[in-house]
Amino acid sequence: MAEITIEWDDAEETIIRATFVGRYTWEEYFQSQVQGNAMVESKAHRCDLIVDLSRARATSAGPALTNAKKTLELAPTNLGLVVVITSTLANIIIKAFRRLDPVLAARVLTTTQLAQARQLIAMSRAEGIAGDAIQ
């Protein structure tokens, strides 16, 4: 069982950070999504998401691509960017997802560090990218 933490990353409650540590199941992943979506839906403003998978492993690759797409399709309308601090599996999934659905995948960025994830979100907000229509 994984340790999964879903929390606000900033005092203004505009960025959610989901941190996964250890082996997680897709069921645990989707349970965390429900919690994160509820947090985003409780706000009228754009919220961005940082998903830290750097210390996590899925118990199975399973239908990873389908699950990644489902995650974004079920996201609240005020969700802006999703920045993934990657693991090896996450990199593979995101690369394949970009080929499968480039429009939906345009909202997903990757990095290797939390500080860079925050910087990517700040740059996006300054430039009005990913979420312009939902701000």
Image (cartoon, rainbow, N blue to C red):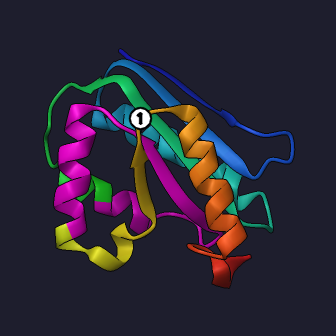
Determine which quarter of the picture holds residue 128. bottom right
Graded by Cα atoms within 10 Å as few (under 14), some (14 to 19) or many (20 or more), the crowding at tag 1 reads: some
The N terminus sits in image quarter: top left
Q: Looking at this rendering, what residue extends furthest in the bottom direction?
A: 133
Q: At x 21% / y 33%, what residue is drawn?
A: 88
**Would residue 35 be seen by someone viewing this image from the given angle?**
no
Q: Which residue is mark 1?
A: 112
Disc count in the image? 1
Q: At x 65% / y 52%, what residue is drawn?
A: 38
Residues 43 and 81: in front is 81
Q: Secondary structure at mark 1?
A: loop
**Would residue 41 be seen by someone viewing this image from the given angle?**
yes
In the image, residue 17 sits, relative to residue 47, either above or below, namely: above
Q: At x 69% / y 66%, what residue is drawn?
A: 125
Magenta region includes residue 95: yes
Instruction: Tell me residue 74's x, y (percent).
Output: 45, 64
In the image, residue 39 sits, relative to residue 124, either above or below, namely: above
Instruction: Tell me residue 55's x, y (percent).
Output: 37, 20
Relative horizontal placement of residue 100, taking residue 19 as reference (left or right)? left
Q: Looking at this rendering, what residue extends furthest in the right direction?
A: 12
In the image, residue 16 sits, relative to residue 125, either above or below, namely: above
Instruction: Tell me residue 67's x, y (percent).
Output: 27, 53
Relative horizontal placement of residue 11, taking residue 62 as reference (left or right)? right
| Residue type (three-letter) at the residue carrying disc 1 | Thr
* Residues drawn in magenta: 69-98
Determine which quarter of the picture holds residue 135. bottom right
Instruction: Tell me residue 97's x, y (percent).
Output: 22, 62
Magenta region includes residue 134: no
Residues 24 and 11: in front is 11
